[in-house]
Image (cartoon, rainbow, N blue to C red):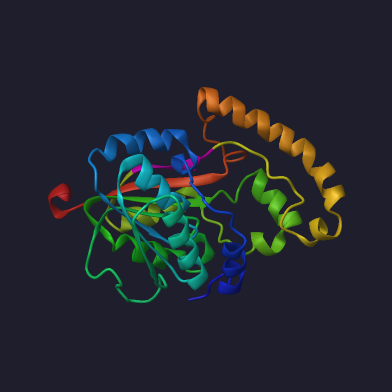
Amino acid sequence: MEELLNIKHWDKIWQSQHLPIFRSYCGDINIHRYLKKFINRPNMYCLEAGCAPGGYLAYFAKEFDCQVFGFDYSNIGVAITKKNLDIQGIKGKIYWKNILDNSTPFGQKKFDIVCSFGLVEHFENWPIVIKKISEFVKPSGLMITTIPNLFGINAFISKIFRPKIYYGHKKISPANLKSKQKMLNMNLIRCNYSGHWFISPPLQMNNFVKIHPNISKIINLPFQVINYFLKKTQQKIGNLWPSKIFSPLIICIAFYLTSTDCA
């Protein structure tokens, strides 16, 4: 199956990470509030597919007292994730695994929570990846899938200024994601645009920044000011409404239905 970004790309990213990393709220305070209701006991098993650099696993471990597991197909990503959890005093089990192979480094274990944050959109045949991830969810377990919103203003900016990054993503709509989840016998709780509104500064992660860093800072400054006020506003009142234009993410939350649930 074709991957839209290769392992060299990811190795370079993971090598540049500054630890420790902690990803709070899954990108959306409203999602966090929902998870607080579902994750209602300690030591629930949480698995992240494509887990580097481990910021979300740290979130589930610290916020919800979950036992965390993860896998990644980058050896550097695996090492960085282990180091990140160690720095934060978190015990986690992290494995090397390609989502497309049939290896089971954690045996036949099924998980209460299975999540992926920005994984499935990097594959041309993304429905197969969704199916693979769903196989790790235990009956009545929760599956969280987060992908970038490639229909809004940030995708437009990325397409112009960072085309290599933009074309490393498959464009998937909430409707596409809903349809696939339902085919996998999942009970959808939510699938919509989500996340803190922000506008991506245009001059980052491209060659112009390396050649003209000072000019880039000046051009990016108005975007950073706007984002500062958006962040402060949303910290006070919560996320603004789901927007195809401004929301950075698409988040899908679903329960895995059992035969009893379907009856």
Q: Position of residue 83 (x, y in %)?
A: 46, 60
All told, the count of numbered labels is 0
Taking the image as shown, residue 163 lies to the left or right of residue 214, namely left
Residue 158 highlighted magenta (yes or no): no
Residue most extreme to the top: 237
Q: Residue at x 27, y 68 (%)?
A: 106
Task: Judge by depth and name the residue closer to the eye, 191 or 53.
Answer: 53
Image quadrant in which you'd find residue 110: bottom left
Q: Position of residue 258 (x, y in %)?
A: 18, 53
Q: Position of residue 109 (x, y in %)?
A: 22, 64
Q: As displayed, is residue 238 above or below residue 112?
A: above
Q: Residue at x 37, y 46 (%)?
A: 60
- Which stretch is magenta? 189-195
Q: Residue at x 50, y 56 (%)?
A: 118
Q: As displayed, is residue 71 above or below residue 37?
A: below
Q: As displayed, is residue 256 above or below residue 102?
A: above
Task: Judge by depth and name the residue closer to the eye, 122 or 108.
Answer: 108
**Can residue 74 be seen by looking at this rendering?**
no
Residue 193 highlighted magenta (yes or no): yes
Main SS of residues in magenta: strand
Q: Residue at x 29, y 63 (%)?
A: 135
Taking the image as shown, residue 109 lies to the left or right of residue 233, namely left
**Can residue 184 be seen by looking at this rendering?**
yes
Q: Position of residue 248 (x, y in %)?
A: 57, 44
Taking the image as shown, residue 255 lies to the left or right of residue 242, namely left
